[in-house]
Amino acid sequence: MKHVAIVLGTRPEAIKVAPLVQLLRTDPWKSHARVTLVSTGQHRELLRGALDAFDLRADVDLDLMTHAQKPGELTGRILQRLGHLFAELSPDIVVAQGDTTTVLAAAMGAFLAKIPFAHVEAGLRSGSLEEPFPEEMHRRAAAVCTKWHFAPTQASKQNLLREGFSESDIFVVGNTSIDALRSVLARPARTGSDLLSGIDSSRRLVLVTVHRRESFGESIRAIFRSLRSLAERFPDVVFVYPMHPNPAVREVAIEMLRGVEQIRLVDALAYETFVHLQARAHLILTDSGGVQEEAPSLGVPTLVLRNTTERPEAVKSGVAALVGMDEQTITTTAAALLSDPRRHAQMAKKVSVYGDGRASERIASVLLHGRMSPDEFAPPHLEEAR
Ligand code: UDP
């Protein structure tokens, strides 16, 4: 029996490790693994909303979130506390997902304690250390401490090979975000029924998320001006914007968008509500990494509000477009999709470019049995239009 410590700190990490935790706690895996789920508490409420969708709770909560935390200080605190915890628990394997401060500290902490580290969602690269900042550095530094690189796609494997990592340590498994998405969509939403039923089904829905550091300041204002002009131009469309709690986004959203009849500003949503809302959307505008993975599986055209993306697969398949943060470009591109049904239909294709829902199974088989089963993830061709 292997003792597996799975470390997480933020909402997307909770969503993306949850399917692995659930799998390892069910037959036949549970006779080979004992899981300790460790939360650093880098996020608090958002994390809870994500874990609830999977009926999970952290076994150990380090509760390290503080007001206005600085990345360097937080890295130091997490590293110190994880060092003590790893010494006490002595796990056989440490697992973390993604590119946050928590992941960097978990990778370094495991490395320093000489515990093999498994990196889930390995090999994503934007190519610029400035964007996303500081996450691109976190991913690269975590890779150096990693024994098993679980790459979601062939492109992410190629990034790791280019950096000199050994092919025998890289496993293309798909993204666990698709495992999570499929499991939650398989049942009706248990949360958010007021919001979901309150949107007139005859009206088109545009779902918006904006939260990245690179968007703060003038870029966020440009994005919000664009939303206002789209709302004026398309009175039949409802815009829903679940606001990230970060005041740098939330306060500007309230200042610029409150009072516009078609724009619903709501608090960050529980994962299940958000997923069901995405499935119902006509168009998504987002700077989120996870949403860029989920939307193509749902066949919802997506405009990515960033200058670069470490998830190029959806753009290459033609179901997402990288539009940056310029007001005019966002408005023109979104308006074209809202006014031209043929153009919209061209992008409204379901593509499984990020996963087939079996990533956790592959990860578990490598960690516990030393070989990957089923075979590596290979995306099928474009599925039918919606
Ligand atoms: N999400 C959520 N509630 C929301 C908005 C997003 O549960 O109100 C989910 C979304 O489905 C995706 C994840 O949060 O799985 C993305 O997290 P986020 O955008 O915070 O981080 P990123 O993916 O950019 O690292």
Image: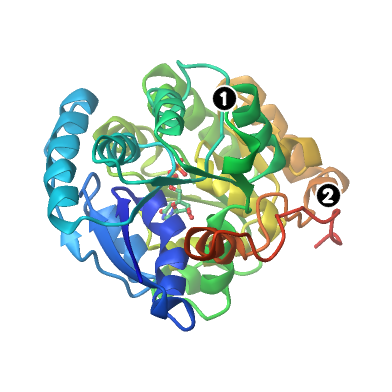
Give neighbour class at mark 2: few <14, some 14-19, many 20+ (Cα, 10 Å).
few
Marks 1/2: CA–CA distance? 32 Å
Name the residue carrying label 1. Answer: 126
Question: SS of the residue at dot 2?
Answer: helix
> In the image, residue 123 lies at what x, y percent?
56, 35
Residue displayed at 57% across by 67% down:
361
> Where, quadrant-wise, is the N terminus in this rendering?
bottom left
In the rendered image, the residue lying farthest to the bottom is 27
Residue displayed at 53% across by 16% down:
128
Report whether the residue tagged 1 is closer than 8 Å to ligand 1: no
Please name the amino acid that badge 1 sits on.
Answer: Ser
> In the image, residue 65 lies at what x, y percent?
15, 43
The answer to whether residue 236 of the structure is visible from this angle is no
> In the image, residue 325 lies at what x, y percent?
55, 23
Label placed on residue 341: 2
Does residue 52 appear left or right of residue 326 in this picture?
A: left
Residue 26's place in the image compared with 264, above or below, is below
Does residue 317 appear left or right of residue 4 in this picture?
A: right
